[in-house]
Image (spheres, rainbow, N blue to C red):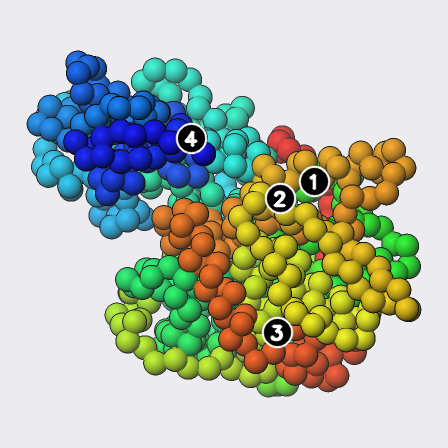
Amino acid sequence: MKTVNIKINGKPVTVPAGTSVLKAAKAADTKIPALCAHPDLKAWGACGICVVKVEGSPKLVRACTTDVVEGQNYITHDPDIVETRRTTLELILSNHPQECLTCPRSGCCELQTIAAEFGIRDVPFQYNVRRLPPDLSTPSVQLHPSKCIGCGRCVLVCQQMQDVWALEFLNRGDQTRIAPAGDVTLAESPCIKCGQCSAHCPVGAITEVDETRKAWSFLRDKSKHVVVQIAPAVRVALGEEFGLEPGTIVTGKVYAALRRLGFAKVFDTNLSADLTIMEEASEFVQRFTTGGELPLITSCCPSWVDYLEKYHTTMIPNFSTAKSPMMMMGAMVKTYYAEKEKIAPKDIVSVAIMPCTAKKFEIQRSDDMRSSGEADVDLSLTTRELARMIKQAGIDFAALPDEPADSPLGAYTGAGTIFGATGGVMEAALRTAYFMVSGKNLGKVDIEAARGMDGVKVASVKIPAGGKEIEVKFAVAHGMANVKDVMEQVKAAKAAGKELPFHFIEVMACRGGCISGGGQPYGSTDEVRAKRTAGIYKDDVNSAIRVSHENPAVQNMYKEFLGKPLSEKSHHLLHTHYTPRPLYVK
């Protein structure tokens, strides 16, 4: 690898060729402020705050879009640069609503933080805040264009990372604004509700729909039995909101906090992830061994479901009909659990804590989400929303003791917990599919080829069957922009009558999987994702049972209630169907 020797404020540093000044400064332990730059995105120099000097030149250059040059010295801070940055900030603030106290991003707003660092107490320019109407059309995310600072992160995420193209810059000059392409509402656009726009927005221009007051209302209602479930990825991220290192496993503290908030029962979505594997692995084995429609494509991610129904409708027959773990848990709460506890489903309120904004959409996606006769899940809150509720209740989260989940829907295996990371669903499914075909467990259950941050991972697993080995070829894609190539390979093979490139495909809409879902704590980068993912796999390794089919709680559910995987009852409660959706709703 070719390297470049430069100086940052006179300090020698060696970095790879093609490194921006912004990244080189970070390597030299020097922070350059920026609002538009983000490690996930290609820099385009929109905000102008990261300006620096090149020694010997009178020009200021933007550090995020300027690559380092051998031998040069870059000056990142001097009185002139500080004053230029201050003026740029003041200009941005002159067009920004002064509504910090009521903004969802107050306390975690990047503009607010930089303004405080620069000690801005007054803005010398005339205020020119455009009062543009908010877009409140989806149940997942809201767009507040008056708060937009024009950094473009949401557009880059939506178009480059997610390949959805729901957001765009409209108009020019001081009339520029962020809106869905065609100037329709988000609900009318191709938006898949993944929330990556809100996760990358530095201010409060795009946020999740906050439903914490609705949750408190449910908890106040003494006529209701309010239960809650937590998703795999929540346990390795929630601690960040309370000063803990990303990836810290706080499962027991989450259970304790939820009880103190007033939930009657605390269940774990990891258990229903194990249940999902029983259904999905059975579905795969049935298709694989009987000549059914292949490849089988996972269906746990609601944004991916929405994307497929809009962009890849011809692949609907390949989609697993298994519901997501959240929805399976909801169905079991209002049937299996309700029956055991002799509580009418209408008297149960089912709440889910998820890393995902699209889950708010999923609970109302189709009538299949009411398989109990009631809404199977009544409310889905993001990890951020749960953190707010814990803070509102004055709970010292870090000091909480570890507590267990409640029976009969709390026990889980390592296979259930790895659902939170890209490749986890595939790995968990293959662990059980291997057993279903061969009658024995994998000697080493870690399928490392499914792991990692490559946008697409391709590998195979060989399973002994009838005196020979059968090869299961699989692909794992995360970040919607990486899905297209996988789908096109399958379509091309089918059209040409050739052998399929894959038998099993996992897709997660968000980079890294659910660990950096649109509802997780702000600040997801690959460094943070790596720590959260490490926490997920640590939880797996520490589990006494690491394969879904050995979860005794799941075994009891089939014995006492469901019968067997893919039974008529499990199909009614645990499976769904898909419908083509138009890209733009008229």
Secondary structure beneath dot 2 equals strand
Q: Residue 456's mark?
A: 2
Disc 1, disc 4: CB below 8 Å?
Answer: no
Crowding at label 2, few (<14), some or many (≥20) Cα neighbours within 10 Å? many
Q: Report which residue position mark 4 lands on.
A: 2
Disc number at residue 486?
1
Q: Earlier in the sequence, mark 3 or mark 2?
A: 2
Looking at the image, which residue is at 87% across and 38% down?
498
In the picture, measured across the screen, residue 507 lies left or right of residue 203, that is right
Q: Secondary structure at mark 4?
A: loop
| Residue 58 location (% of width, % of height) | 17, 14
Please name the amino acid that badge 1 sits on: Val
Reading the image, the residue beneath label 3 is: 546
At label 4, the amino acid type is: Lys
Asked if the residue under mark 2 is in contact with the one under mark 3, i.e. CB atoms within 8 Å, the reply is no
Cα distance between the residues tagged 1 and 2: 8 Å
- Alpha carbon distance from label 1 to label 4: 32 Å
Q: CA distance from mark 3 to mark 2?
A: 25 Å
Q: Pointer 1: residues within 10 angstroms few (<14), some, or many (20+)? A: some
Q: Is residue 272 above or below residue 367?
A: below
Can you give x and y, in whole percent of width and height, for residue 268 in the image? 53, 72
Q: Earlier in the sequence, mark 3 or mark 4?
A: 4
Determine the residue positioned at 65% across, 73% down: 547
Q: Are marks 1 and 2 in contact (CB under 8 Å)?
A: yes
User: Which amino acid type corresponds to the residue marked 3 in the rendered image?
Assistant: Arg
Residue 322 lies, with reference to residue 411, above or below; the image says above
